[in-house]
Amino acid sequence: MISRRTALASALAALAAPALLRPASAQGQPFTLLLDWFINPNHGPILAAQELGYFREAGLAMNIVPPADPNDPPRLVAAGRGDVAVSYPHTQIRQAVDDIPTMRIGALIDTPLSTITVLADGPIRTLADFRGRKIGYSISGIEGALLRTMLATAGVGANEIELVNVNFSLSPALLARRVDGVIGAFRNFELFQLEIEGSKGRAFFLEEHGVPTHDALTFAANRERARAGDPRLRAFLDAVERGALYCTNNPEAAWGLFVKGRGQLDNELNRRAWRASVPRFAKAPGAVDRARELRFARFLHANGIIPRIPPVDSFVAQLA
C-alpha cells in the first residue's frame, strides 16, 4: 500500500522528463503553466487542450511544469516567473489579504473534492459517531476549519475528537485502523485507492455538512496582468474550456490523450479517478460567481484562516 505522498513523489520524478511535458507546438507566444502537483486526472482539460492543439490554435506555445514544491506556483506567478498557476481558492483569498499580487482568473474543478472518509465496515455511520474517536489529517489550518464545521452540524465539538497527523498517508492510516476517519481525502482518489486495496470507503461531503460550495482547483495569474486584461489569459481559459468540453463529450478518447506518452499513468487507480473527475471539470472556467466567492471568504474569516475579509475584486478577476 502506497501513500498519496509516495505516489505523488514517484510520479513527479517521472513526469519531470521534458519529453513527457512536450509543448503542443513551438509556434505561438510562450506561455508557462505551473501545475499544483504532478500530472493527474484533475488536469484532464489541460492535457486534452494540449494534445488536441487548442492552445496552439489560441496562439499559445505551452510549457506545462509540475512544481518542485506545491506551495511555490502562486508565488512564482506573483513574481512574474510563470503566466498561470493551478492553485486553491483559500490560497487566492489569503494572498489577497497578504497583498501578494495574484488573482483567480478561472477554475479547473469548480466543486469541492475533499471529504471526511471512513471505512464502510468501521464504527462511523454518521458524523455524530466521531465523538471520542480519532481523525487523521495532512494539512493543518484549512482542513481543521473544514472538520470543525462539518462536525458542528452533528453537534460534535473539536474537543471531543482526537486529531492525528498522518501526513499524506490517509488511506494507509485508515486501512491500518490507526484512525477512525480522515479529513482531506479526495472523492476522486482515496475512495478508489481503498477499493483497490480490498476495502470500501464511505465519504461525508463538505458541501452537505455546512461548508460553502467552492472550487477545488483554480487558475491564478499575476494581479497586474489580470487587471490589465492580458489577452493571453483569456486565450488560455478558452482553450481549457474546449478541453473540458472535449473530455465531457468524449471521456474515453480523452483518457487516451491523457496517457499518451505518459504510460506510467495508465493504471487502475488513475482510470477510476479519471471517470470520477470528468464530471467535475469546470465547463465554463472563466465564469465568476461573486456571491459564492464572498461566502467562502467569510467562511475562512469565521474560522480564523484569514484575519479579515478582503474585497472580492482583490482576489477575483473577471476577464473580458
Image (cartoon, helix red, strand yellow):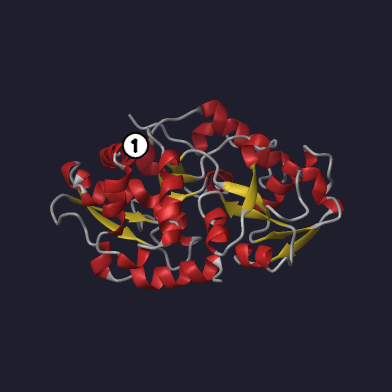
Evaluate whether residue 93 shows in this view.
yes
In the picture, which quadrant includes the C terminus? Answer: top left
Question: Does 97 sit left or right of 209 as displayed?
Answer: left
Count neighbours of disc 1 (C-alpha within 10 A) and say few if under 14, some if 14 to 19, many if 20 or more.
few
- Which image quadrant is residue 165 in? bottom right
Asked whether, in this view, residue 74 is left or right of residue 298, the answer is left
**228 or 112: nearer the viewer:** 112
User: Which is more toward the observer, 221 or 60?
Assistant: 60
Q: How many marks?
A: 1
Residue 89 lies, with reference to residue 22, above or below; the image says: above
For mark 1, give the secondary structure. loop
At 74% across and 64% down in the image, what residue appears?
A: 164
Residue 143 in percent (x, y) is at 66, 52
311 to 203, vertically: above or below: above
What x and y, as percent, mark residue 159? 86, 52
What's the amino acid at mark 1?
Answer: Ala
Residue matched to label 1: 228
Quarter of the picture holding the N terminus:
bottom right
Q: Is residue 150 left or right of residue 113?
A: right
Residue 140, quarter of the rendered image: bottom right
Identified at 64% across, 61% down, the residue is 138
